[in-house]
Amino acid sequence: MIEIKNSHQPVPISQNRSKNVKSDLQYIPDEYREVARNLEGEFAKYMVDQMNKTVERNHDNTTNKIYRDLLDTERANMMTKTNNGLGLQKIILDQIYPKRLRNKLSHQIYQQHMKSQNQRFHRSKQPEMLSNPNTAISTKETSNE
């Protein structure tokens, strides 16, 4: 008979991970993270709503419905914020922002692109009075009239 001695204690998963491995999540733009967070929240809200439909309610007036809806929203928010959520954010991010784009160079290119888009947007939204000094009316002329 072979006797197996196990002198090792179980190691929590958080301690078992290598400290040197960088997460590729740091290279995902905030806009994409927010979309994933919101989608997970919507799913959690839908799930809580569906669970509530299985419970029979006798006194269901408008006030109770509003209160229950607010309570369900808070429950869904708590589900997505605690313990890294339901785990859907990572799956959603894998779909909307592929792993091949999760590197420093791609992240820098994305940031430069967004910066140029913002500058282009702000230039196109400038009022004509500010861009053409000949059409600007001074405040002294209008206040004296």
Image: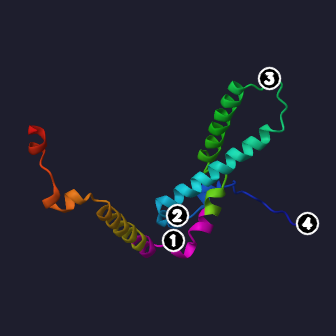
Identity of the amino acid at label 1? Arg
Identify the residue at horizontal 35%, vertical 64% (top origin): 121
Res 72 → quadrant? top right
Identity of the amino acid at label 4? Met
Q: Which mark lies nearer to you, 4 or 2?
A: 2
Q: Which residues are magenta?
A: 93-108
**Mark 3 or 2, nearer chain start:** 2
- Please state if 130 lies on the left or on the right of 52 as rendered: left
Q: Is residue 134 magenta?
A: no
Q: Which residue is mark 4?
A: 1
**Mark 3 or 1, nearer chain start:** 3
Question: Quick one: quadrant of the N terminus?
Answer: bottom right
Comparing 64 with 88, the one in front is 64
Label 3–label 2 contact, CB within 8 A: no
Q: CA distance from mark 3 to mark 4?
A: 67 Å
Q: Which mark lies nearer to you, 3 or 2?
A: 3
Q: Which residue is mark 3?
A: 59
Residue 62's x, y, as percent?
Answer: 70, 27
Label 1–label 2 contact, CB within 8 A: yes
Q: Is residue 97 magenta?
A: yes
Q: Which mark is residue 102?
A: 1
Label 3–label 1 contact, CB within 8 A: no
Q: CA distance from mark 1 to mark 2?
A: 7 Å
